[in-house]
Image (cartoon, helix red, strand yellow):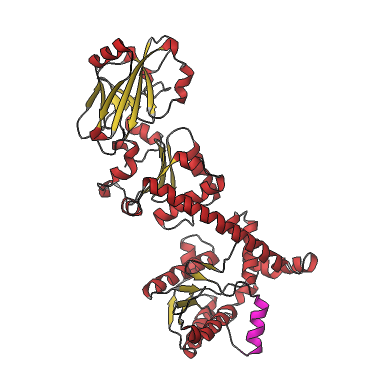
């Protein structure tokens, strides 16, 4: 938990727990050559009592010769502006300040004064909220830089030590009111359970939480190993941070156990944004639904964070980094390899004409066209509608399409989206602007000009990997069918 020569930053509120923790670490400092620092946040609450707590902490740390960093902020006002619960908002503020001072002072460990009672209360809170395994594992003794040396020490033992040794500490009278859920659990629920069901309920909770924590750590280890393997196939950490794009193979993802899938999603969001706090169970289910949906789709996860599923890949991207004004050259190498890998600069490229049709009609084989410049190749086949299962058309892979040959005005061309393009999507009565179609399928505007379009001399026939045109749909009256397969990276 702590190593020799560590620089340790203690979060000191002035309450009994943080006073006990500071004295405990101070007693170890000389023996293990630990350098101690302290941080206190004055929330400017309780009609001036919080400021008196700040003065107590200043004197307390001075007596122990521990350097103290302080901040003060109207936490209640800050929480109101953000429509946050005060306890949660105050916790986030403390965390942000602790991270700030830890970074500025090369801190190795941040010590928090959570005790066994806090663990039991948090367990019950998370259980009442319907939390997952990570939630009921509650407060771990250490997590990265964060250490909690008192997590298996009960509050009564801390108070007993301080009182027996005449050590002063601050008392927050709001902790004695049942205004918050945690206070209700501590003041009413746990004593009721102790009196009527199990006297050792806290001990039992600690046991369950410890077992859940061990299971959580094991699953998290599997998740991170799997995540790293999946990243190494399609991304580098440098690309992710530079482009704001993270790409995962959908086949590899769908083969995972459900609990690993959920954690992979959170790991991807955390790596891309550095914050996954707002991603709850409902949002995870929405993301899983998008991924398992058979059709290409997209979803806004949170501000500046989107997910897009297409071409056999899952894309997480930070739109703040990949907006039009910041689109980098490396972007096409990251997100859009499932399309062309680069935008088509030519007005259009002929990929199949009347002469190709004659060749195909005469030998009945496959005709291949390879466009190395654009990282894409095509295979063309002719088929008879009599020998084609029309019902199969609905289950064609995203990179394949079938057209009624009689409806094509050759040649077939490959091009990118242009302003003013119209398209009649399969199954719809009327044509619409391609711009509106992209909006309907929630394709981010940053992606649109990278999507290959297959057109004939008159109209768009296929928005690659999304939809074919209703104009060339296969009907019972159709005779010959042109089967087109686009192969990316071939």
Q: Nearer the viewer, residue 87 or 284?
A: 284
- Residue in the picture at 55% in, 76% down: 46
Residue 29: image location, x then y, percent: 49, 84
Residue 138: image location, x then y, percent: 59, 63
The answer to whether residue 466 is magenta is no
Report whether residue 64 is seen: yes
- Residue in the picture at 46% in, 77% down: 8
| Span colored in magenta | 152-166
In this rendering, position of residue 431 left or right of residue 396: left
- When asked about the image quadrant of residue 413, the answer is top left
Q: Residue furthest left?
A: 346
Quadrant the C terminus occupies: top left
Residue 234: image location, x then y, percent: 37, 45
Vertical position of residue 413 compared to residue 62: above or below: above
Report whether residue 445 is seen: no
In this rendering, position of residue 437 left or right of residue 2: left
Residue 483: image location, x then y, percent: 36, 19
The answer to whether residue 159 is magenta is yes
Q: Nearer the viewer, residue 10 or 86?
A: 10
In this rendering, position of residue 289 left or right of residue 165: left
Q: How many marks?
A: 0
> Magenta part mainly helix, strand or loop?
helix
């Amino acid at each position: 938990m702590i190593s020799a020569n560590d620089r340790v930053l203690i979060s000191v509120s002035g309450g009994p727990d943080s006073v006990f923790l500071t004295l405990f670490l101070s007693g170890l400092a000389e023996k293990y050559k630990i350098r101690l620092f302290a941080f206190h946040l004055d929330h400017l609450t309780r009609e001036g009592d919080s400021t008196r707590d700040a003065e107590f902490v200043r004197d307390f740390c001075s007596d122990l010769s521990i350097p103290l960093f302080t901040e003060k902020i109207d936490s209640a006002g800050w929480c109101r502006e953000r429509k946050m619960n005060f306890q949660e908002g105050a916790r986030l503020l403390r965390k942000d300040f602790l991270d700030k001072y830890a970074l500025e002072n090369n801190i190795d460990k941040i010590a928090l004064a959570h005790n066994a009672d806090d663990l039991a209360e948090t367990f019950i809170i998370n259980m009442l909220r319907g939390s997952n395994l990570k939630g009921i594992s509650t407060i771990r003794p250490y997590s990265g830089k964060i250490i909690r040396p008192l997590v298996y020490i009960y509050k009564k033992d801390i108070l007993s030590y301080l009182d027996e040794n005449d050590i002063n500490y601050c008392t927050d009278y709001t902790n004695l009111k049942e205004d918050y859920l945690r206070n209700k659990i501590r003041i009413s629920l746990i004593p009721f359970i102790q009196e009527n069901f199990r006297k050792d309920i806290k001990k039992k909770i600690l046991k369950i939480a410890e077992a859940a924590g061990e299971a959580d750590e094991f699953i998290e280890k599997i998740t991170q190993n799997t995540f790293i393997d999946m990243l190494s196939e399609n991304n580098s950490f440098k690309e992710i941070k530079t482009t704001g794009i993270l790409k995962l193979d959908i086949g590899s993802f769908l083969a995972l156990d459900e609990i690993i899938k959920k954690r992979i999603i959170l790991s991807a969001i955390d790596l891309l944004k550095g914050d996954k706090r707002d991603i709850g169970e409902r949002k995870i289910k929405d993301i899983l639904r998008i991924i398992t949906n058979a059709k290409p789709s997209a979803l806004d996860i949170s501000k500046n964070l989107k997910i897009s599923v297409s071409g056999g890949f899952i894309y997480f991207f930070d739109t703040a980094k990949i907006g039009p004004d910041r689109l980098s050259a490396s972007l096409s190498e990251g997100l859009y390899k499932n399309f062309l890998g680069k935008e088509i600069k030519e007005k259009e490229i002929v990929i199949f004409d009347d002469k190709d049709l004659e060749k195909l009609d005469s030998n009945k084989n496959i005709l291949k066209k390879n466009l190395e410049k654009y990282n894409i190749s095509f295979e063309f086949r002719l088929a008879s509608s009599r020998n084609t299962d029309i019902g199969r058309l609905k289950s064609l892979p995203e990179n394949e399409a079938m057209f009624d040959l009689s409806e094509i005005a050759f040649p077939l061309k490959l091009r990118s989206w242009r302003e003013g393009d119209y398209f009649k999507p399969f199954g719809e009565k009327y044509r619409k602007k391609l711009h509106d179609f992209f909006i309907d399928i929630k394709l981010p505007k940053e992606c649109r000009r990278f999507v290959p379009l297959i057109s004939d001399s008159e109209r768009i026939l296929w928005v690659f990997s999304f939809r074919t045109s209703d104009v060339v749909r296969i009907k019972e009256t159709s005779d010959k069918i042109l089967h087109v397969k686009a192969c990316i990276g071939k």
